[in-house]
Image (cartoon, rainbow, N blue to C red):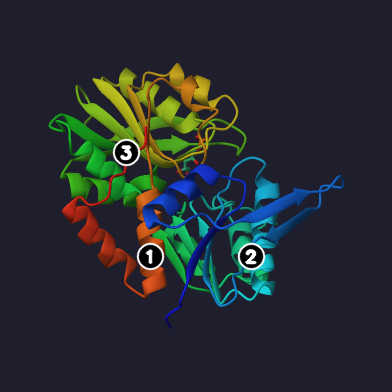
């Protein structure tokens, strides 16, 4: 099914990224207003005609998280009632992705609940990036496209001498992603055995599979939240004889004291993307490199609108080096 007009709107979570996506697409960001009443209720007004349009709504998971989630639902609802023909929720960092299984008695599977709520709000499809676990895609009954930051990060890394580099997974859960990097960059890999006794406790590295002595180690992770995982892993790697430690991750959540922890850790560079806003944290981490995902999202939005394959388009664009990802 082809749609005539494409429009992009954004909630208040990450308007910088939404603007960059629109710049790449060569269209203005759609106008909407969010009003917050004294009782904390939100009201969204779409300020332009969206009748019969193919609409994309950009909202990411960041503080204040629940307000941003509600704002997304209400934006979608407002667009639905304004007669948009199709609504795609573009969520660069999906909320609640770590709540994806019932691994303890009587707990919720909130990622699944999020998928249901997006559909109930009126989303016809979703566009996501690097889900904590790939199977979360299957929680959606509506089409869910998942983008990956690996090609962006690999393209950035390929410009340097990688001869002494080994890729390191900070825990077993990261191994599948690591294989993707290892295949692209043709590098060997190592896996840290990470244990976390309680959810609110910092994870600890206890042993490692693979040879890292004298090597430059690149830790790959999907997200940095408290920073505990990569900071502990970096100290562990240095103690085991690593020459240098670098980190690459998609979602720089950087909660609490994470910026200070990273700044004080034996990590030479922290390579992240802009799936969440970083303006207030960037200056606290001297080793930070931010790569933008905006052209990738713009390309995916254009492909969805045109009814083209998302994956094939990116293989082509990356081969041609068409996408310029460096942000700052
Ligand atoms: C865990 O399974 C994830 O892949 C990340 O390692 C984790 O979410 C990072 O959290 P934190 O920075 O709080 O250790």
Mark 1 crowdedness (10 Å alpha carbons): few <14, some 14-19, many ≥20: some
Q: Residues within 10 Å of mark 2 (few under 14, many from 20)?
A: many
Q: Is the residue at mark 1 in contact range of ligand 1, meaning its CB lies under 8 Å from it?
A: no
The residue singled out by tag 3 in the image is 326
**What is the CA distance from the residue labelled 3 to the residue labelled 2?**
31 Å
Residue with the mark numbered 1: 302
Report whether 211 appears left or right of 85: left
Residue at 82% x, 47% y is 40
Q: Earlier in the sequence, mark 3 or mark 2?
A: 2
Q: CA distance from mark 2 to mark 1?
A: 19 Å
User: Would you place residue 121 above or below residue 102 in this image?
Assistant: below
The answer to whether residue 157 is left or right of residue 268 is left
Mark earlier in primary sequence (2, 1): 2
The answer for how far apart the CA atoms under marks 3 and 1 are is: 20 Å
Q: Position of residue 270 (x, y in %)?
A: 37, 29
Q: Which residue is mark 2?
A: 76
Residue drawn where x is 27% and y is 64% of the image: 313
Mark 3, ligand 1, within 8 Å: the answer is no
In the displayed structure, does residue 92 sit left or right of residue 108? Answer: left
| Horizontal arrangement in the rendering, residue 193 relative to residue 261 (left or right) | left
Q: Residues within 10 Å of mark 3 (few under 14, many from 20)?
A: some
Q: Nearer the viewer, residue 191 or 124?
A: 124
Q: Nearer the viewer, residue 98 or 209?
A: 98
User: To which quarter of the image does residue 118 belong?
Assistant: bottom right
Position above or below: 216 against 17: above
- In the rendered image, residue 82, in percent from the top left (x then y), is placed at 67, 72
């Amino acid at each position: 099914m082809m749609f005539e007009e494409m429009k992009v709107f954004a909630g208040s979570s990450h308007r910088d990224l939404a603007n960059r996506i629109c710049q790449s697409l060569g269209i203005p960001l759609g106008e909407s207003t969010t009003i917050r009443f004294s009782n904390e209720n939100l009201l969204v007004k779409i300020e332009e005609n969206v009748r019969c349009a193919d609409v994309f709504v950009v909202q990411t998971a960041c503080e204040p998280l629940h307000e941003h989630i509600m704002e997304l639902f209400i934006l979608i609802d407002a667009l639905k009632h304004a007669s948009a023909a199709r609504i795609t929720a573009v969520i660069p960092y999906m909320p609640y992705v770590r709540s994806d299984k019932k691994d303890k008695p009587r707990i919720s599977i909130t990622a699944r609940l999020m998928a249901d709520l997006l559909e109930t709000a009126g989303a016809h499809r979703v566009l996501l990036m690097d889900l904590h676990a790939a199977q979360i895609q299957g929680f959606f009954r509506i089409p869910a496209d998942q983008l990956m930051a690996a090609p962006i990060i690999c393209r950035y890394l390929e410009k340097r001498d990688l001869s002494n580099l080994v890729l390191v997974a900070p825990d077993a859960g990261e191994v599948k992603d690591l294989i993707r990097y290892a295949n692209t960059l043709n590098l060997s890999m190592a896996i840290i055995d990470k244990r976390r006794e309680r959810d609110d406790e910092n994870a600890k590295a206890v042993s490692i599979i693979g040879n890292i002595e004298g090597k430059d180690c690149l830790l790959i992770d999907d997200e940095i939240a408290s920073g505990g995982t990569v900071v502990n892993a970096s100290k562990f790697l240095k103690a085991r004889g690593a020459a240098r430690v670098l980190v690459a991750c998609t979602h720089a959540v950087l909660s609490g004291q994470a910026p200070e922890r990273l700044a004080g850790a034996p990590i030479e560079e922290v390579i992240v993307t802009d799936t969440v806003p970083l303006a207030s944290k960037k200056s606290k981490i001297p080793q930070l490199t931010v790569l933008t995902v905006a052209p990738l999202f713009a390309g995916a939005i254009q492909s969805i609108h045109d009814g083209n394959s998302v994956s094939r388009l990116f293989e082509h664009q990356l081969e041609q080096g068409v996408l310029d990802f460096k942000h700052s």
